[in-house]
Image: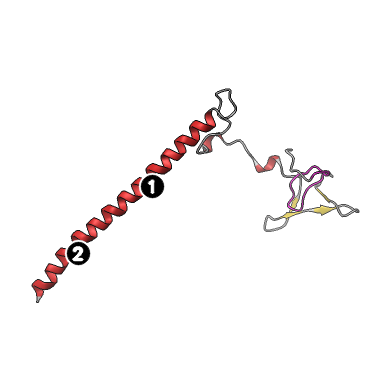
Amino acid sequence: MASGVDDEDEETQPEAQRKKMESDMQSSQKLTEMNQTIKMADTLMHDFNGNGEKPIDVPPRADLRTFNENDILGEVMRDEKGNVVVQKDSAGACKDKDGNPVNHRGYLIEPESGAILEN
């Protein structure tokens, strides 16, 4: 009876190994496809504007990021938890400490369009 269990284990181990190999191959194939897509996107972006420059890197590189949230945030107060507290003027419009128009989250905006502005 013990040999029957051993025979069963011997049959399932190769099956399990085969399934793992197939799974690894599928994962490898998906990674290869993703890498090819990234390379293709990078190539397309390189000549996007016709002058040979890339407007953005694909995928984005963290060391080249220049955006800072403080550049678009007005001079606003914060509560004890660090949440933005927006003040309103007598007309009910959201303003920062300097009187600049901001949205309900404290970002500087252009009053006519509501577009977020850089400080």
Image point (54%, 27%), residue name: 47
Q: Residue furthest right?
A: 90
Residue 63 tag number: none
Rate crowding at label 2 as few (under 14), some (14 to 19) or many (20 or more) other CA atoms within 10 Å.
few
Q: Residue 91 vs residue 49: left or right?
A: right
Give the alpha-carbon distance from disc 2 to disc 1, as whole Å.
27 Å
Give the camera-side residue of 110 and 7.
7
Q: Position of residue 76 (x, y in %)?
A: 76, 49
Quadrant position of residue 15:
bottom left
Q: Position of residue 40 (x, y in %)?
A: 46, 35
Q: Secondary structure at mark 2?
A: helix
Residue 30 tag number: 1
Q: What range is drawn magenta here?
A: 101-113
Q: Tell me the quadrant of the picture where the C terminus can be found.
A: top right
What's under tag 1, amino acid-wise? Answer: Lys
Going from the N terminus, do you reach mark 2 or mark 1 first? 2
Rate crowding at label 1 as few (under 14), some (14 to 19) or many (20 or more) other CA atoms within 10 Å.
few
Give the camera-side residue of 114 and 44.
44
Rendered image coloring scheme: secondary structure
Image point (72%, 57%), residue name: 79
Q: Position of residue 14 (x, y in %)?
A: 19, 59
Q: Position of residue 99 (x, y in %)?
A: 84, 45
Q: Secondary structure at mark 1?
A: helix
Residue 12 tag number: 2
